[in-house]
Amino acid sequence: MSPPADRDRTARENATGVWHACTQGFVWREAYSGDYRCVVPGSRSANRVDNANAPYRLAWIIMTRWHHDAPPTNCQDGVGCSTNQSDYYTAGVRGYYLTPGAQVTVQIMKADTQQKLWSGHATARAGGKGPGGNYDLDTGNLLCQGGTFAQPYNAYVQVRENDDPWSPRVPISYHKCNNL
């Protein structure tokens, strides 16, 4: 998602610009394949920079904790049942600056081997707690050994919108626990 000033400029160009027949001092915008809107050269340059930076805006990724209530016990009169279950947390991923309605792919990769540890999909939604479209995904993997924020980092998260390039790597500490 572009910064507000860039979106405003593009909206003005779309409302007032001319298609195809550029006069002297104007160029085709070329913000996407087939974009023949006539604009000043600085606008075309700004669009190229904005498009080149698009994957980096996806990198505002936050590791989160998802709270899960303890499963209910099936005890009758306290006979033959376990009561040592308690609430627990799983690692989650949240991201912002996406186009609302876009399909988002998130992956967590092991840093040293590039092995995929987890991946998930979501649809970016408008509104919420952050700018632009956003998503929240629960990895389902229990937090253990101090959680996902402590160094040393052993993994990274990447995101991509639709089939666009992957965002830069966001380093994390990721430990998968096998049982509750």
Image: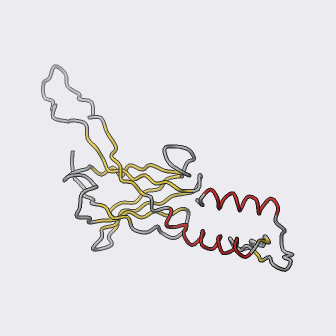
Q: Is residue 104 left or right of residue 32?
A: left
- Residue at the image position 56 percent from the left and 52 percent from the top: 132
Count of number-bearing discs = 0
Question: Which is more toward the observer, 75 or 44?
Answer: 44
Q: Is residue 95 left or right of residue 49?
A: left
- Residue at the image position 49 percent from the left and 64 percent from the top: 160
Q: Position of residue 69 (x, y in %)?
A: 30, 35
Residue 50 occupies quadrant: bottom right
Query: Where is the N terminus found, in terms of image quarters?
Result: bottom right
Q: Position of residue 47 (x, y in %)?
A: 65, 70
* Residue 105, placed above or below residue 69: below
Question: As drawn, which residue projects farthest toward the top?
Answer: 77
Query: Where is the C terminus found, in terms of image quarters?
Result: top left
Q: Position of residue 56 (x, y in %)?
A: 49, 66
* Residue 12, placed above or below residue 166: above
Residue 116 occupies quadrant: bottom left
Colour theme: secondary structure
Q: Position of residue 99 (x, y in %)?
A: 58, 56
Question: Which is more toward the observer, 139 or 43?
Answer: 43
* Residue 135, placed above or below residue 82: below
Question: As drawn, which residue projects farthest toward the left?
Answer: 79
- Residue at the image position 23 percent from the left and 29 percent from the top: 73
* Residue 145, placed above or below residue 79: below
